[in-house]
Image (cartoon, grey):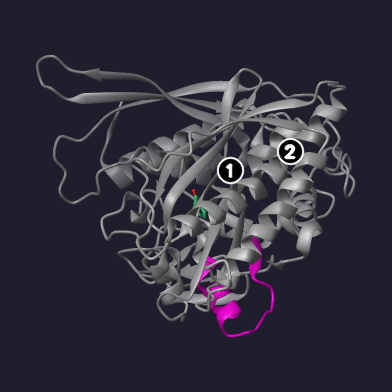
Amino acid sequence: KLAKTISVNGKTFETSESHTNVTPSIIALTSRSLHLNESHPVGILRSMIEKKLNSIDGAYKTYNEFEPVVTVEENFDSLGFPVDHPGRSKSDTYYINSKHLLRTHTSAHEMECFGNIKNKITDKPGFLISADVYRRDEIDRTHYPAFHQMEGARLWVRDKNLTSEGVGKHILQIREDVANLEQQLQAEKTRLIVQDDASLEGNPKQDYMTDLEVELCTRHLKRSIELVVAQVFNKKLESLGDVKQELKVRWIKAYFPWTAPSWEIEVWWKGEWLELCGCGLVREQVYLNAGYEPGTTIGWAFGLGLDRIAMLLFEVLDIRLFWTTDPRFKNQFKPGEVTSFKSYSKYPGTVRDIAFWLPDDEPRLPAIHENDLMEIVRNTAGDLVESVKLIDTFVHPKTGRKSLCYRVNYQSMDRNVTNEEINTFQEKVRTDLAALYGVELR
Ligand code: PHE
């Protein structure tokens, strides 16, 4: 049943029985490039952030057209992901074959971009990479198998010759860079109230960096991200007519295999903490993988999710809208402008349940993962499904067999869906579930 080859954006790849799990509906998304569309919320936000970060010293080269297919090495190995990391599994990641996958994050391009600095292909000490990324995941209003990230990174080449102060020249440079950022942050209309305990307990620094280097790089990283947050949210607060323009943010410790120490920043928005971005000081191994000599560079990287922020900024409540081609959506946005989306008539949804017994022991067939069910529903109904939720689990007291019940909400963003269509979808989902995973339908 599996085709011998598949092509993604005009490039052809061999498939593999053991790995290929990417489907035509997912491949279709790879040519959309919403982040390049200057009149799309994701593209408007991308542009805004690029301009802001480059307004200070123009230090960032932008890469916005990397192909979505990358190697396992680029996406995981070069970043030090352990071999048994769950992110590598077929239930989380779309594989093209055993060597290629759809990137799960823009960090997949870090090694190449650091290499470009090392090889003097660019003379800028930083970069911003924006791209579509892909993850197998649940289906609801805030999750979609494709979304967008912006990767940012900045590095400084170490100077071993000491100044009269007893430090390398790079230290003076970072100090100056930090001072520029702090000045810019002061000038922003939105004031951030920052919670940051700054302790490195349980979030250790790398041995190859001095305490002073860690302190300065960290300040540069955090102030850069705070600047982005202040600008992005300023647009929103202004459009809401907020006069105080204060925003609470907090830095919390995090873990990523390729940064140490690592953090996440969260913003207090509408009564809850919203995660915006993961970041940290780049592990030396990544620089070595990119061709640098030991001990020669220090710096940071961040990865920012664009879709969630764009949803909040433009007041788009369902992430599927980003992918619609309906002119009533597309025509509402203009380059460089943050406007609130006015929802057009919402079509009613229809709920259907699917219940089944899990097979006791069916060695011929793969065990079913929740994301496999999501994929079947998505392949059948595409964007006509709003959400799929587990609503009941039941273990039979005598036999010990387990039964699951999922509720599917069929609802379109741009038209009415008929009962006949839904019956056909529902029947297909049930047949596929039984055939592929041997479950017993109820
Ligand atoms: N790639 C990470 C993610 O997708 C974010 C990140 C980027 C973290 C760069 C640290 C450094 O969650």
Q: Is residue 364 above or below residue 410?
A: below
Q: Please give the name of the residue rendered at 42% of the width and 42% of the height, measured from the top-left corner.
A: 254
Q: Is residue 337 left or right of residue 79?
A: right
Amino acid type of the residue tagged 2 in the rendering: Ala
Q: Secondary structure at mark 2?
A: helix
User: Residue 357 or 421: which is nearer the viewer?
Assistant: 357
Q: Residue 407: x, y in percent?
A: 46, 23
The C terminus lies in quadrant: top left
Region of the chain picked out in magenta, as a range: 109-129
Question: Which residue is disc 2 drawn over?
Answer: 230
Q: Is residue 250 above or below residue 288?
A: above
Say if the magenta span includes residue 123.
yes
Give the label on residue 382, or none.
Answer: 1
The N terminus lies in quadrant: bottom left
Query: In the current view of this chain or complex, which residue is farthest to the front?
Result: 164
The answer to whether one can see residue 174 in this image is yes
Q: Is residue 187 left or right of residue 69?
A: right
User: Residue 338 or 390: which is nearer the viewer?
Assistant: 338
Q: Give whichever of discs 1 and 2 has the lower sequence position.
A: 2
Q: Is residue 284 left or right of residue 175?
A: left
Q: Residue 436: x, y in percent?
A: 32, 47
Q: Please give the name of the residue rendered at 33% of the width and 53% of the height, measured from the top-left corner.
A: 89
Amino acid type of the residue tagged 1 in the rendering: Gly
Give the label on residue 285, or none.
Answer: none
Nearer mark to the viewer, of 1 and 2: 2
Mark 1, other Cα within 10 Å: few <14 / some 14–19 / many ≥20: some
Q: Secondary structure at mark 1?
A: helix
User: Residue 195 or 153: which is nearer the viewer?
Assistant: 195
Q: Residue 266: x, y in percent?
A: 57, 33
